[in-house]
Structures are given as C-alpha cells and as structure tokens.
Amino acid sequence: MGRTHANGFRKASNFFNLPMQPVLKAACGRDEKKLKDYCEKWGWESHETDWRKLVERKDIDVIDICTPNDSHAEIAIAAARAGKMVMCEKPLAMNGPQGEEMVREIEKAGVPNMVWYNYRRVPAVTYAKQLIDEGRLGRIFHYRAKFLQDWTISADLPQGGAGLWRLDAAAAGSGVTGDLLAHCIDTALWLNGNIESVSAMTETFIKERVHTGTGQKQEVKIDDACAFLARFNNGSLATFKSTRYARGHKALYTLEINGEKASIFWDLHDLHRLQYFDHRDEGPLRGWRSIHVTDGDHPYMGNWWVPGLQIGYEHTFVHQVADFITAAAEGRSASPTFRDALETQYVCDAVLASAASGAWTQVKHA
Amino acid sequence: MGRTHANGFRKASNFFNLPMQPVLKAACGRDEKKLKDYCEKWGWESHETDWRKLVERKDIDVIDICTPNDSHAEIAIAAARAGKMVMCEKPLAMNGPQGEEMVREIEKAGVPNMVWYNYRRVPAVTYAKQLIDEGRLGRIFHYRAKFLQDWTISADLPQGGAGLWRLDAAAAGSGVTGDLLAHCIDTALWLNGNIESVSAMTETFIKERVHTGTGQKQEVKIDDACAFLARFNNGSLATFKSTRYARGHKALYTLEINGEKASIFWDLHDLHRLQYFDHRDEGPLRGWRSIHVTDGDHPYMGNWWVPGLQIGYEHTFVHQVADFITAAAEGRSASPTFRDALETQYVCDAVLASAASGAWTQVKHA
Amino acid sequence: MGRTHANGFRKASNFFNLPMQPVLKAACGRDEKKLKDYCEKWGWESHETDWRKLVERKDIDVIDICTPNDSHAEIAIAAARAGKMVMCEKPLAMNGPQGEEMVREIEKAGVPNMVWYNYRRVPAVTYAKQLIDEGRLGRIFHYRAKFLQDWTISADLPQGGAGLWRLDAAAAGSGVTGDLLAHCIDTALWLNGNIESVSAMTETFIKERVHTGTGQKQEVKIDDACAFLARFNNGSLATFKSTRYARGHKALYTLEINGEKASIFWDLHDLHRLQYFDHRDEGPLRGWRSIHVTDGDHPYMGNWWVPGLQIGYEHTFVHQVADFITAAAEGRSASPTFRDALETQYVCDAVLASAASGAWTQVKHA
Amino acid sequence: MGRTHANGFRKASNFFNLPMQPVLKAACGRDEKKLKDYCEKWGWESHETDWRKLVERKDIDVIDICTPNDSHAEIAIAAARAGKMVMCEKPLAMNGPQGEEMVREIEKAGVPNMVWYNYRRVPAVTYAKQLIDEGRLGRIFHYRAKFLQDWTISADLPQGGAGLWRLDAAAAGSGVTGDLLAHCIDTALWLNGNIESVSAMTETFIKERVHTGTGQKQEVKIDDACAFLARFNNGSLATFKSTRYARGHKALYTLEINGEKASIFWDLHDLHRLQYFDHRDEGPLRGWRSIHVTDGDHPYMGNWWVPGLQIGYEHTFVHQVADFITAAAEGRSASPTFRDALETQYVCDAVLASAASGAWTQVKHA
C-alpha cells in the first residue's frame, strides 16, 4: 500500500487545485535497504526505521499509517497525542474496543483524521451517493454487496510474512471480514445508513497452513469466507458476502441498491461504470443504463481526461488525498473519519460474534 | 400456466421423438366460458368443470395439476388413487407434512410423477448439471442464487383473485419463498446436493392491501422478500435471496457455483447463455467464457435450430413433457419427482421457521 | 426451414386472435419417405411430391415456398397465376430481373404476398422501427450492420447437397450476400429508407471444395465474405459486413443506428434485448439502456409470457404468420411484400456488381 | 496532451526500473501565464515561449512534440538536426510527403525517435499482439475497427481555437481520418501487417461553423466521418469506421480480429478487458472469454497493482515513456518509430484520395 499512498500524495497536486501542497518528508519501514530503494523511487526526502522517531519529528504534520492492522492503534494514538494529523489504513482497529480508544484519543487531540476506505471515492460510487442524497431512489428496500476473490484456494499457500500477513489472525485480526467486508460495510453505511442487526456465518476451508515464520503447519484462524444477513435502520434488508474461494473472481466488489423509484449497481472490476435503472423512464423504454462515469460533470472526472477515457484503482487514493488536504487546510477531517470507521468496526464485531454464536446480533453504534 | 403446459404437450412431439404421443383429451376449469375458449384455442377435445370427474374418466392417463397451491394435495392424491400418472405445478404442497402425504400416496400408487420445476431444463442449466457431474468444478466452496422481481412495489396492487392469488397467503401458502425461492432451491439441490441448515429473514413491505374478494383492506400475510444463509451437506456456504421489490428486475433468477477448479454462472434474463470460468485454462488467458448454449451438442438443442438461434422460456416445458413421456413409457417418473420436490418443501419450511424464530434451523430430509 | 414455417402456422392461432385459421392442408417435397415423416410429425393432412400438383389443387389457398433460391421464381409465378396467395422464402429471387418478373406476376394476380424476412418481427426490431417512426432518433447519421458466422471455415466441408446448397452458387445465386446480407439489407431499408449507392468487396477464402453431387473438387463460386459501404437516401453513411469466417460467431447479426437525438443497437445473439441511448436524458445520467423487450406493451409480447421471460428465434415466424393472415383476411399483403423484397434484391445486385467492377454503383429502385 | 506526457514522464520511474531517469527540464508554450502555471503544477524546471530556443539548449536531450499537426514537421526536423531525440504526437505529419521528409531527417540524424500512438500500450492490446505473434489465431480472415465519438453533433460548436483546432482543416490536416482512424490504422498495421488497397467515403455533416478566430461562419473542411474497406497484404478483409456523430459513444475505439483458430476483440471503453475466443477449446464449452487483463503475467501489469485492479488511459503514456527510455539508453528507437508512423500516414493519404476519387486506391509503403 506504500506505493498507492505515495502515488496519491504525488499526483494530487498535479490534478487538483489544493490549498496546501503535500511534501514527502519521511518514510518509515523496518527493512532499511528496501526502505531506501522505496524512498529513492518515490522521492521521499528522508527515512526512519522506528515510527516513534517519526512521531517526534517537528517537521512532520501528518502521520499516514499503512502497517498491518495490529499496530494501527498504537501508532495512531501516539501520533494524535503528538498533535499530528492522522491518516490510517483500514480497518481502523483490531476490534471495537480498540477502535473506541483510538476515536477517543484522536477526538481529544482534535486533529484532522481519515481512514483509507478508498472505494468511496471511485467516481461511480461517489456519484451513486449523490443520486441517493438527491432522493432519486425513494424508499430503499434492498442492499446487496459482495467482495469475492480466489487467491487463497491453493492449500500450498503459507500464512504470515510479507504479503501474507492477511492470512495470519494475529496480525490481521480477522480474515475476509476485516479485509474485504469492511470495505463493503463502509460503503453501505455511507450510502444506506446504519445497520441494526446481523446474522452471520463464517468458514475456514483450509484448516492448516505452513507459517512462513515458523516453517510449521499451524491452524488457520482467520475466516476464509463470511456471509451475513442484515437489517438496516431504514427498514431495508441486506446481504453481504465475501470469500477468497470464489474461483474466477480477482477482486469482484459489487453493490446494488433497490429503491422504490430507482436502482443502482456497481462493480469494481469495471469501476468506471454505474448501472442505473429509473422507473420514471417511459414504460417500454425502461432499461438498466450503463453510465460510463467519465464525463466532466461526474464527480472528480473534470480533473482527469476527456469523456470516455477511464481512470483506475490508484485514482481513488489521489481523490482521498485531495479531499483530505482540502479539509485539513480548514482544520476539518475528511470522511470516513476515525469515528465513521468505528461504526464499520462495530458491524464487523457483530458479524464475527453472530458467526460464533449462531444468533442474530445487535450492532453497537459509534 | 395452462398455456405453457398445453404448448408443451403440443410441441413435444413436433421436436422430439417420443415413444408415446400426448393427446389433449380434456381440460378442466371453473369458469366454463373461459374454459371453452381455451379448449378451442389449444385443441382440447373435451372439458370438465369439476376436477373429480376428470379423475374418474377412463380415457385419461395423466392428470396435470396447475391450480393454486392450496389444491395440489387433494387433486394429486385423488389422481394417484385412481391410478393416473400425475404432473403437478410447483411448489408441491402448502408445507412439508402435506407434501409427505402426497409422496406417500403417489409412491403407494406407483404411478409416474413429476413436479414442474421447469428451470432444470433450460439447456444452459442442464448443461451446468452435466459439467458438475463430470467433476469439472472440483470441491464446491460456494453457491449463490437469487430471484428478483419488482411487480408488487405499488401499494395500489390488490391481493387475491385471478392473477393475484400469489399475494394471498390462504391460496399461496407463502410469498416469494414458495413462489420464487422454491425454484432456486430445487435447482440448488439438484446441482449441489442437500442443504443442512439455514438462517433466514423475511419482510412484508406493504402491510395492508385491498382484497379483490372482499374489496376491503386486509393484512398482507405473505413474505414480500426473503433471504437466507445456508450450509450444504458438501461443506459449501450459500446465500439465497428473493424479493418482489427489486426495482429494475422482472424475473432475474441467477445462480453461481464456485468450485476449486471451475465456476459457473447463469441468469434467466439471458437464459441461453452459460458463464464458465476454468482455472485449468492457460494463466494469462483465463477469463469467464460466455457460452451461447445453442449448439447441436448442447442439451436439448440438437432438437431445435441451427447454432446461434436461441429458444425461450416455454421450451423448458416442452423439454419437461418430452422427458416425462419418455420416462413414463417405461413406467418411470421424471425428475424432479414428488419426493424430490418434498425435499425442496422441507427447505422452504425450515426457511420460514428460521425467519419466524430468528435461529439457525436444521432441514428435514425427504 | 420447413419446421419453422409449420411451427409458425401451428402456433399462430394459439397465441394470437386471428380472423382465419391456417390449416396444414398439404406439404410438398421430393423425398417421399422424409416427407411422410415430416407430415406425420407436424400434422399435415396430405402431401405431394410435385409442387405443380399443389398449385393445381382447389383446396389450397396459400402456397408457401421454402425451396432453394433457384426455384422461387417458377413456383411463385405459377402459384400467382393460379390465384393462390404466396409466401416466399428469402431472398426473393436469383437476381433483380428475375425478381421483377415475380413482382409483375404477383401484382397482376393481385394476391396477398409476403417474403420471409423474419427478423423484422423480432419484438426488439419491431420496437426499434416504432421508435424511429416516432421521430425519437432525429436526423440519422449512421447505420451499421453485420452478420457473422463461422461454420464454413473448415476446408473439408463439401459444397452442394442437402444442408449445403448454400455453398453452391448454382442453387444459391450468391454466398453470404443473398443469404445473410439480404437480411441486413431488408431490415435497413425498413428502418432507414432506400440506399442510393454502394462500394463493395467480396472474397472466397476456400477456392475449391468437393461437390457432394459429383464427389469431385470444384471451384467455389459463392462469396464467403462481403463488405460494403453505402450511402442512404436520407444522407446517412453505412457499412454492411457479412462472412462465414468470423471465428466465434454463430449467427451474430447486429445493427446500430446513430441519430442526432438517440441511438439504437440490436444483436441477434441476445434478440430479446434492445440497447437504446437517448441524449435527452439528464446529462450525467446518460447511458446505454439495456431494454429487456419482454413486457406486455412491447410489440407482440402481450401475446406471450409475463415480463422477463424471453422468446426465441421461431417466434418471428409465428408473428409473420399472424400478420400475414390478418392482412390476407382483408385482401392485403403483409410486409415485406414481393415488391419490398425486390428492393433488397436490387441492393444485392448492386453490391455484387460493385465487388466485380471495383467501382461505386448506383442502386436501382423497385 | 501536455498533462498526459508530463504525467508519463513523472510516473515512469516510480513504477518501472529505468536505465535513465527523465528530468522535466523545460516546457514550451506560447501563452506564458498558462505555461508558468503548468510548469509549477508539474515541476518543470524552466520554460521557453519559442520552441527554437528549446532546440538550441545544450541541457535538453529529448524534444517531445505535442503541438497541433501543422507544426510537427518543422519542429521535429529542427530537433533532429540539433541531435536531439524526438518524441512526436500523432499523426506524424500533415501528409505522406511531409512525413517522408521527417523520416529522412530523423534517420539521417540517427537519433532515437517515437510517435505517440499510445493505444499500442494498453496492456490488453499489447497482449493481443503477443497472442498473434505466438500464432494462436492462425490464418487471419478479418479485421474490423471503429472509433466513434459524438462530441461535434451540435451545429453551435465553433471551429478553430484552443481545444477546437481539431475541427480546423488548416491546423489538423484532416478530421476523423488523422485524429481517430490514424489510431485504428496504427494498431492494425502493428497487429495485422500492411494494407494494400482501400475504398473510402467521407462526409461533412455540418457544412459551416463559426470560426473562433474570425467570428464568421466558414466552410467546414474536415471530414466528420470516414469509413473504408481495406485489403491487407495477408489476404484478410477489413473495415474501418470513424465518426464524431455516433450519438452515445464518447471514445469507442474497438477492434476485432478473426483468425482460423481464434478471435480477439477489444474496446477502449473497457480497456482493461480482452475478449478472446479459441476454437481449440472443447466443443460445447467454447465461448468468448472476458479476460480481465490485470494479472502480474499480463504485459506491463506486474508493475502496477494486484490482480483485479484496473489501470486507465494515462498509463499507456507511462508505458510508452518507460519503453522509450529503455530503448534510448541503448541508442534505439521505440515503436512506433517515425518510419512506422509514416506507413500509417500513407494509409490515411490513400483513404482521403479514395474518398475524393471514388476509386479503390493502392497504399504506398514506407
């Protein structure tokens, strides 16, 4: 993720008019050789191998956390206490209580903050939010989301270590729930409001994998797959599904919302398109519209290329940097804030609790 | 449904080589004027307004039931006792216990029988079954199905009466569960084996509707929407969803199966296509194949037109007639039999029970 | 084609309210054994092995011609002279002059007539015609059509004989031009008016094939592929393409019309869908609509199933029978008439002439 | 285009391991105020308002030309004579003879050169080239390409001036032929070899537009639309089409190649997907594969994100910079070279000549 963030910082001012310019002051990592290469490639002015030093430096205004999940809290809290603005990779925390502490500290410090749920800023998704806010969908009946991958099907894949810490419950907290469903939940809360209760199931298909640290076979403790039913506060019914065992799907995050008047569908594999159905269209001419979200009047797209020319994944980070800097210049946070992300954390906690208990579970609210 | 069945009986011998020819001996209905018109249009030789007379007639070999759900049991049992072969519209019964009685009687009578879960015989679905039976998917991880409609969103739509008995719990037994999910479940059991347990939720979005019989507003007792999580006997995880409140979808029945080696997706709105992903394809050339299931070596399609020319909805009934007659000529039933359909009934019962109790519920087996 | 026609005659009165009922009086063919099987399967009351006898029979009102192209003229003219109504398979004739004679005779006889360019009556195509007639597209700039197949790529395929007469220039007149492009041209003339001039190229990729009659290798004289540029009378520019060497396409007939205000796209491989783009839609919400042409208010569809359930290829023939009988009951022809089909013939002639000469060629008009 | 180039230069070294690092030494433009803003936004070290000064500077190694078409030749030739490496926007020249002079000078100077036909480096297109070079398609029968836009339909749009010089024949040389078809031709020559002859038609739908320079209505001299038939050297037949009057299409560049064994389709509106059909697949399982060209083993994609995450339009320029620098470090040019681009120029010339004469026209070769 270091590359996506650095790229975001570098490109934001090329394509957006920002009130302040981000400066790549210092990068931090534990492997100094790799770190130096990274700094050179991306133009970081300096580096540290101990994040605490970074937090102490006077010339640093923003701490951007993109470490594994188990270290978010410690770094974020230290940064907040040092008065730094904080950007934090998702999910916010290992669980709700830890997230609560982070929110408490960041709000006490009063520093601008944001969590990198980047998919809110895919132009098609941002545009969906706008259409919903304009009341075009009417009363919402259904929300459906899924995030499907297939990269862990092989039993030979080890757990733990660089690139594979997501399979290690100690570092990741959970499997697909915190990694993939957290994205689906963040978008859903943004588009459709709070979730009241959930009924979930999880499964670990491969029970043991070699750990890259020990070289030994160890029990796999993460959830390989998770699905849950949900009831939203607005009365709509929802299903959420995620797995790393859906052969044929690399990163298929889709969402669909069915309202009384209109429906919306979006798919990360073709992220520049929004499917839209409007019942107010003339009867026999009704159909799902495939909107190529690349026009100058689509969110963010006036800053990129001419109509018809698509942007990609990394641009969501550029947008997030631009929005954060714009907000931070006025002392504000950008969405989703730590508090927004805590609400997602509570849903994840309820999902995992429901999967463990087999019972419908109420969601705590941030 | 009378038209789809009559059309099936008439066309089967045009397009398939059958060991016996179906004869449209007599049609039965309560409105004699409409019935006569129907008989003339479709070439039925005679008619009855009391189904009991039909069951008594010596010149009738097969009773085909396409009445509302609450009369299936009585007619089917009488027909079986009279030694008639029986074809019955889905769902088999109002509930499991009633279905058990029907199975007991039909099996005691030893007559060929079949239930009209017609989607098994969409060529693309039949072909999916064949691919699974050949072991091409490997271990199954996930099954997902949904059946989405949008025709009951208007609060002005009444319940009960011709064409609207599906909204009346007294006639229909349930809402989308028995009407739509039953289709999804039938196909799923056929393709993926038995379901062990479910966690479900249902909702009735419009609480009261005018009843066409009484002209009064009455409580709506059917489920407008239903979604459930399921665990199959083979260890796979599943979600099933159905609603009549998904704006933009007329009859969107989709199913997807993810196996270790390959995945399959199908969609009723483009029923002549099967999407197929095979991990054994050469790495960089892997992709979902859109198979136009219209070749001579695809199931049933050698009996229709040249490659590329699609068939439609009603052909599934023609296929079902052809298969039933072929089996019946040898004294066998065709799938799904009453017993097969009872298994679907048990899943529906468990779904409705789980939705009522909020607890995971075990599925009884036929 | 015998099956598609017989099916059309049988089903039309099941699904449409017709002023007269078609009766399958007599079928004609040269192989008496096959003919008897066909008659039995489809319920023809009698048969003849000499078409002249059929034309002489008093109990025959309509002659339906579905022989190879080289016999259309003789049969049609004899039938017209005998005062029979005539339905004729496409293309009308071997060439324009022959078609002129047919038109002269049929119009002299004053009998209702029609040519089986069935694709006009795919509901999505009929609906496109309606949208154009309503002026929704505005000034037309472009028309594009193609008809792609891949069934003759193998050099081992013979020419001539049953099922393969389409590869034999003596029986077929031309290759893809008369077989496939004729369909594209018929629809184009109907939707977009007359064509003024064309520039064409043709190619025969496999130069020699064994003839099933002689068993010898003979020169292939048909066009395997043909493409042409065209200028319509309304000022729009067009391209037409057809081939039997487009690997991966079974019967991909597509058409697209670009107007000032709206555009339309249709594809035979998913014939129940119409793609529609309307510039009058709100700016950022503009997109191609995928219209599932299966609603009761779509052309012909009120006579079939509930919304969302698709029909297929053979239904176009049912529609054509229904329209022909409705018109014939009033003494009228149904479109496309022999005269309409002559216009298509003239375009085909101009295309083949241009391909031979290498020059832009004016189209004669019917 | 200045932004796409600058972005390409800045990002290439972030994502690719380059033997030399591009330095943004100086930008040149006529409007000094805009130029300064641009330089600041993108980090150009200095600027010039006279391109001749740039060519004289000792600290400049590469001249990158992104001016209107009528100035390419003069700048490129001056740069080559000054011993600079040259990158030039497409089309290379105003016509073939001018292009010949450019090639002569650049080859005499022996400097690395390249023309910005960027679509060769969309990963899906590069991958298509690789598949063709591996012989997977077999003998080629057909090539089809089109580039459709709809941005000039309004008669109120003026010609000439910033952003609209493409409508002014004096600056652009031609309309869609040089602007859009040139892209299609460049890719086609790369994928399918040389074109032997063409038959073309062009049209100017709006005959007069206000010129932004004079404020007067003036004749429009560019081609609004162009279509042509072509025969390739390898015996395949082709059609090419382009227009700015195809309502509903923003930048729909599509190409399809049909070979004996396999076919390929690609579409700029979903540039990260390649459609592939392979006849060697098992019969009933054949279908067009939708390949999401985002895996590490797809061209260029190992340098970007994890599988499933798409890149966009601007990345083609990054790839082109990376390839140019890699080649230039060894004294080589990158494709397409000036000479390659001259071949495209000759095809454009033949197309315009054929449209004017109405005759098939032979293509000169570079």
Image (spheres, coloured by chain):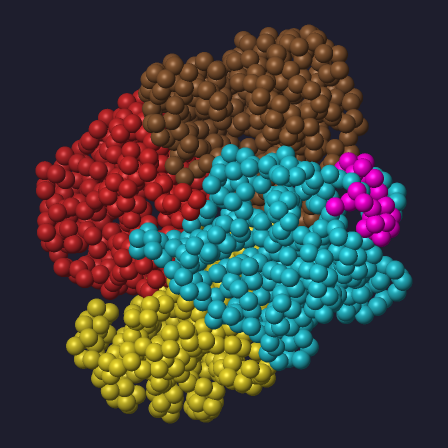
Chain colours: A red, B brown, C cyan, D yellow
Q: Is residue B135 left or right of residue D91?
A: right
Give the residue drawn at x 41%, y 39%: B248
Residue B71 shows up from this direction: yes
Give the residue drawn at x 42%, y 16%: B213
Locate residue C11: give its quadrant: top right
Q: Is residue A236 left or right of residue D109?
A: left
Q: Position of residue C269 (x, y in %)?
A: 58, 50
Give the residue drawn at x 43%, y 54%: C134
Q: Is residue C75 above or below residue A80?
A: below
Q: Is residue B260 above or below residue C246?
A: above
Residue C68 shows up from this direction: no
Q: Is residue C48 magenta?
A: yes
Q: Is residue B154 above or below residue C30?
A: above
Give the residue drawn at x 53%, y 64%: C193
Taking depth in this image into account, of B226 and B87 the one nearest to the observer is B87
Q: Is residue B92 magenta?
A: no
Q: Which residues are magenta?
A: C38-61
Q: Position of residue D318 (x, y in %)?
A: 38, 67
Taking depth in this image into account, of A221 and C355 the one nearest to the observer is C355
Taking depth in this image into account, of A113 and B363 the one nearest to the observer is B363
Q: Is residue A183 left or right of residue B48?
A: left
Locate residue C23: give its quadrant: top right
Q: Position of residue C202 (x, y in %)?
A: 67, 71
Q: Position of residue C215 (x, y in %)?
A: 89, 61
